[in-house]
Amino acid sequence: MARPEVDSAARTPDGRPESQQPRWRRDFPIDLPQDEYVARRDFTKFMVLTSLAFAVGQVWIGVENWRRRRRGEPAIVEIARVADVPVGAVITFGYPGPHDSCLLARTGERTWLAYGQECTHLACAVVPELSESRLRCPCHHGYFDLTTGRPTAGPPRRPLPRILLDVRNGSVYATGVEVRTT
Ligand code: FES
């Protein structure tokens, strides 16, 4: 990007000489072409750094998944873009396999929770009730705490499997499954 010429950079916005400019403009002299040049330069720098961070992130995920495949562990999978899930929303996704149904809930600006959707009683699909901060199983009226995934009422005795999450570069990733017995 070419830097503006000194002459054009020093030009006042209304074309009048410096001595006829209002007091505030003389106290805070900002050359508009120069200002735009700096803004464009900073924006370009920001875009390059953002793209670089994204590329490094993708390489890291590729290497990590290669290592996980060799060890027989679940892969790292992008579930959603942060911008696509407003606070208070719940989406479904498949993890670790595409047919293993899970729920992702965004309960705050930076708060995400995810669980396997299969009830630990007899495997019905639980449904979210965010206003009650719980997950409900419609088959036998089982309830789970939304924050912990632990059973709070009804027949279920074991917590829901927790999906481990990582939020980076504007995306939410599933990174593993924590199966709990108590
Ligand atoms: S299957 Fe969920 S409570 Fe029975």
Image (cartoon, rainbow, N blue to C red):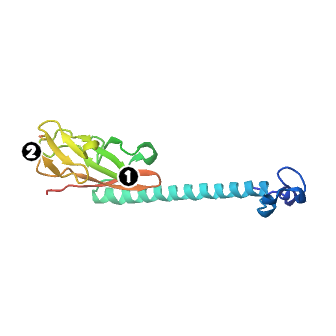
Q: Position of residue 61 (x, y in %)?
A: 41, 56
In the shown orientation, is residue 53 left or right of residue 74? right
Q: Which mark is residue 173?
A: 1
Q: Nearer the viewer, residue 163 or 30?
A: 30
* Mark 2 or 1, nearer chain start: 2
Mark toward the viewer: 2 or 1: 2
Q: In the image, what residue occupies the spot 29% across and 49% down? A: 114
Q: How many marks?
A: 2
Q: Secondary structure at mark 2?
A: loop
* Coordinates of residue 170 in the picture (x, y in percent): 46, 51
- The residue positioned 76% from the left and 62% from the top of the image is 28
Question: Image quadrant for the C terminus?
Answer: bottom left
Q: Residue at x 35, y 60 (%)?
A: 67
Name the quadrant where ligand 1 sits. top left
Location of residue 116 in the rendering, given as x and y in whole percent from the top left corner: 24, 47
Ligand 1 contact, mark 2 (Cβ < 8 Å): yes
The amino acid on which the numbered mark 2 sits, given as a three-letter code, is Pro
169 and 29: which one is in front?
29
